[in-house]
Image (cartoon, rainbow, N blue to C red):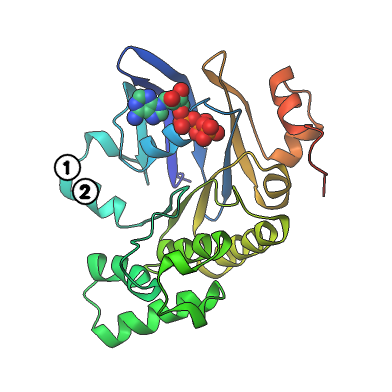
Amino acid sequence: MTPLVEVQDLTMRFGERLIQEHVSFDIQPATIFAIMGGSGCGKSTLLRHMIGLHEPASGHVRYDGMDYWAASEAQRNAVRRQFGVLFQSAALWSSMSVLDNVLLPLEQLTDLPAEEREARAREALGWVGLSDAAQVKPAELSGGMRKRAGLARAIVAQPRLLFLDEPSAGLDPVSSRRLDDLILTLRERTGAAVVLVSHELPSLFAIADDGLFLDADRKRPLARGSPRALREADVPAPVRAFLNREETTKP
Ligand SMILES: Nc1ncnc2c1ncn2[C@@H]1O[C@H](COP(=O)(O)OP(=O)(O)OP(=O)(O)O)[C@@H](O)[C@H]1O
């Protein structure tokens, strides 16, 4: 079966500076795929290469077998329309209400009539438990609520692929767990695959089915598999150290 995403021998650089090389993996539909590794190893950079914000120094990123960087601009746009993205900061527009923020992708990506757009945006806010916050401005929300509003915006256009960059960073354990549950529920409801950048062990063990560990020193991937499986496997020392950090409790 053609994978939903296939990354083949990717090299990522900023100018002369090598970030990662020999990055290869594939993602099957409806998988929650974790990009793991220590601070600065290139997790967010890999995500940005996957969503078309950075062009690889070499290698390929394929969607349904189509080579993204060899495709026409129209083909790339069609692929990007299938993405939902939640950046680390949630990146909500501060001057707009929560509802208007969530409406944006529907206005940009669909020709739905206004009432239908609003109904879908309100439904997405309902999924993330923010029905009562539709008219407030993002600044009035807590950090966890902002993340959930960002998640509502990321999913409202029913993406096939959801990219989440550190969704639980800065959240208390209860909010973080709630977000994990939401991600699982969304995957069940929509069948979307999720690419999750995270170093939060409880979250990784709870929801990721597959993943890749990037090593900051060797500048290449060191392990592939679900965080749960890798925790039990004979893996290189940096992977073992990352997955058995003592400051977190195993579920
Ligand atoms: N636009 C850019 N230009 C130049 N260097 C960059 C750029 N973006 C990131 N970097 C560098 O690339 C390296 C990888 O950064 P990245 O943010 O991808 O790491 P990360 O694994 O996501 O880290 P963290 O867990 O701390 O968020 C870092 O050294 C960073 O300084």
Q: Mark 1 points at which residue?
A: 72
Disc 1 marks a residue whose amino acid type is: Ser
Disc 2 marks a residue whose amino acid type is: Gln
Q: Is residue 41 visible?
A: yes
Q: What residue is shown at x 46% (from left), y 44% (from top)?
A: 3
Q: Do the residues labelled 1 and 2 touch (CB within 8 Å)?
A: yes
Q: Where is residue 64 in the image (x, y as percent from the top left)?
A: 37, 46
Q: Mark 2 points at which residue?
A: 75
Q: Where is residue 130 in the image (x, y as percent from the top left)?
A: 52, 76
Q: What residue is shown at x 45% (from left), y 61% (from top)?
A: 150
Q: What residue is shown at x 65% (from left), y 35% (from top)?
A: 225
Q: Is residue 241 left or right of residue 31?
A: right
- Circle 2 residues within 10 Å: few <14, some 14–19, many ≥20: some
Q: In this view, does 30 lie to the left or right of 60?
A: right
Q: In this view, does 201 lie to the left or right of 136?
A: right
Q: Say which mark, if any, is on residue 12.
A: none
Q: Is residue 43 visible?
A: no
